[in-house]
């Protein structure tokens, strides 16, 4: 794949985490309060069922358990740990903990995909984590052991989902829409019992609530995850994982535009560091040029 095509694919894939970054704004402004797991369930399950109804393709053979694993890692367990971290940690600390995801992807790619770890990749990981810290970390942010562990587990779930998606690929003859529908449906079904056990259903819904849920499901899940899994099929695992930094970046920009949140010099520096880390992660090593064959030396008699 040429550098231009890589850049185009990366830009299109980055739209997915950018859309996910709008989740905070939609949740706080349009959804019923204190219903994070309900929002996650209604975000995943309807979108998955719509895609299944449209494609009418179901897993076969080994792909039954593979779809289950990927759906839990990429959707169900990831959403759950994400919201546990959000409950126990300030938003900036939660985002900083989750920024270890590319480092986990780096290690898993070396172990499962036989990818070689390069110094520039380690530097990109550190630069990206520092950028997220400058972008979202607030002074005097508190730490909570449960929140930190949940954040690490959430990052590990998404990292594992990215690497296993690269390792297993997509079944032959199965469309991207069907593949996405499998995972969203599994993730939503996993979240249903947790949601019912821990949250009460709202007594009434406004049109704003309905619009917010529709946005999260149709745009935040269906469209975003189709773009995400398309990108995973075409980009290296580590390069794709760095694109998730677009989520806190987009959340910060939307907070500035619509919620009156201020941006200081350190946040602009953090944004530049995040963008720089993504650019570094997309760089491919130069292939060694083949050396011309030397003519055999004449034999001496």
Image (tube, rainbow, N blue to C red):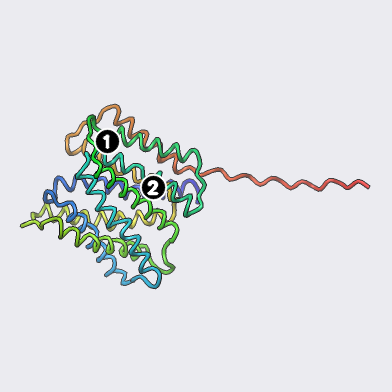
Residue at 25% x, 66% y: name it: 49
Q: Nearer the viewer, residue 268 or 190?
A: 190
Identity of the residue furthest to the right in this view: 301
The front one of 49 and 97 is 97
Report the label total. 2
The disc at residue 253 is none
Query: Which tag, 1 or 2, sits closer to the chain's start?
Result: 1
Indicate whether 127 appears above or below 200. above
Residue at x 31%, y 34% (from the top left corner): 133
Residue 194, quarter of picture: bottom left
Which residue has dot 2 on it? 241
Q: Is residue 201 left or right of residue 191?
A: left
Gap between marks 1 and 2, in whole Å? 19 Å
Find residue 264 and report its horizontal and vertical position in percent: 26, 28
User: Please, which residue is most extreme toward the top here?
Assistant: 265
Residue 274 at x, y = what percent?
A: 36, 37
Residue toward you, 213 or 163: 163
Rendered view: 103 above or below 170? above
């Amino acid at each position: 794949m040429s550098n231009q095509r890589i850049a185009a694919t990366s830009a299109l894939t980055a739209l997915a985490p950018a859309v996910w970054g709008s989740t905070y704004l939609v949740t706080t402004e349009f959804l019923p309060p204190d219903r994070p797991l309900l929002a996650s369930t209604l975000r995943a399950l309807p979108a998955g069922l719509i895609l299944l109804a449209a494609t009418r393709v179901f897993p076969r053979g080994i792909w039954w358990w593979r779809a289950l694993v990927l759906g839990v890692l990429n959707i169900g367990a990831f959403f759950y740990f994400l919201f546990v971290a959000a409950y126990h940690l300030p938003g900036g600390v939660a985002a900083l903990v989750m920024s270890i995801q590319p480092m986990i992807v780096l290690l898993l790619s070396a172990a499962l995909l036989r990818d070689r770890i390069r110094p520039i990749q380690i530097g990109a990981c550190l630069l990206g984590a520092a950028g997220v810290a400058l972008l979202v970390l607030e002074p005097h942010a508190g730490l909570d052991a449960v929140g930190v562990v949940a954040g690490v587990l959430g990052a590990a779930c998404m990292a594992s989902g990215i690497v296993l998606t690269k390792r297993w690929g997509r079944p032959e003859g199965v469309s991207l829409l069907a593949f996405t529908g499998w995972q969203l449906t599994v993730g939503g079904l996993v979240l249903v019992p947790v949601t019912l056990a821990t949250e009460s259903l709202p007594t009434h819904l406004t049109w704003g609530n309905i619009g917010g849920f529709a946005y999260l499901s149709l745009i935040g899940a269906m469209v975003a995850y189709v773009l995400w899994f398309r990108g995973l099929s075409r980009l290296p695992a580590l390069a794709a994982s760095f694109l998730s930094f677009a989520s806190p970046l987009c959340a910060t920009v939307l907070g500035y535009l619509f919620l009156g949140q201020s941006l200081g010099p350190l946040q602009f520096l953090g944004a530049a560091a995040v963008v720089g880390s993504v650019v570094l992660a997309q760089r491919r090593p130069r292939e060694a040029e083949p050396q011309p064959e030397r003519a055999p030396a004449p034999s001496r008699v």
